[in-house]
Amino acid sequence: MSAQETRSDNSYFLFDNEIITQVDDQFFDQNSTDTIDTAIGRGEAIFFSTDEGEFVLRHYRRGGLPAKFLADQYFGLSRANSRAWREWHLLDELYRSGLPVPQPVAARVVSAGLLYRADLVMRRLQAQPVAEILLREPIDPEQWNQLGETISTFHQRGIYHADLNARNIMLGDDGRFYLIDFDRGEKRLSGGGWQQANLKRLRRSLDKFKASHAPFYFSDSDWQQLLIGYQPH
């Protein structure tokens, strides 16, 4: 078993000891000299490098109205039920089963009474968000077909992605599509219509990008190719 837990004062750590032998607060509090790059989403993702490789650090932040009051704080006393612990274990299971997701490296929960803050570190993918690619150039029909197959594979295994959008799908240098950001993701039963809701969320995301950016290389025919790939074969 590669998952190991440690504690230092109010900081609790979960990490893969096959990748790193120990973690502490400094591992999560990366300074500018360690930073390779950053990316802005709901929260800032920091890319950094160590002797063990290149990693991505994501600090959990709230979205919507709650962000005005508790920007990066969550209620909870159980580490096992924290956002970071749940996402780490889900990613670990998906990665080890061969699904195209980032490899989880470490998670941290910093407790403060009834509240906590959290972070997640993953191995960096050599990949770009689909949303950024489509701002520059089209994706060919075969790739849209492949993306549909990828999403279908997750759905057939009962994997729910809570925020399937064009930023959370990456096209790797290896030609594979990857899904990232499994915060609030979970395993579900096949019924209930959540798979179609996932697809509709992705379509709304692509349409929103197209309405607010020009050029943005996405069309109805691209979506049809995705749906063809999505259908079971």
Image (cartoon, rainbow, N blue to C red):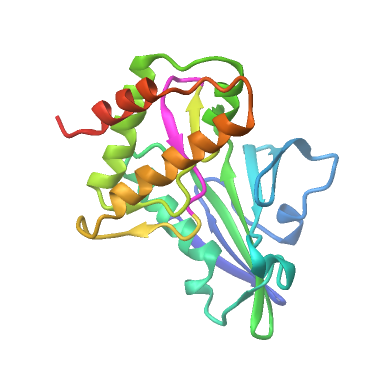
> Which one is nearer the viewer's eye here, 174 or 209?
209
The N terminus, quarter of image: bottom left
> Which one is nearer the viewer's eye here, 29 or 7?
29
Name the residue: 63% across, 63% down. Answer: 108
Is 208 contained in the magenta span? Answer: no
Q: In the visual, does 230 lie left or right of 61?
A: left
Q: Is residue 82 shown to the viewer in this render?
A: yes
The image position of residue 60, as x and y in percent, is 64, 59
Residue sitting farthest toward the left: 233
The image position of residue 185, as x and y in percent, is 42, 57
The C terminus, quarter of image: top left
The image position of residue 84, as x and y in percent, is 55, 62
Chain part drawn in magenta: 173-182
Q: Main secondary structure of the magenta part?
A: loop
Is 176 contained in the magenta span? Answer: yes
Q: Is residue 166 shown to the viewer in this render?
A: no
Name the residue: 72% across, 53% down. Answer: 27
> Which one is nearer the viewer's eye here, 59 or 111?
59
Identify whether 50 is placed above or below 73. above
Identify whether 80 is placed above or below 33. below
Name the residue: 78% across, 49% down. Answer: 30
Residue 118 occupies quadrant: bottom right
Residue 77 occupies quadrant: bottom right
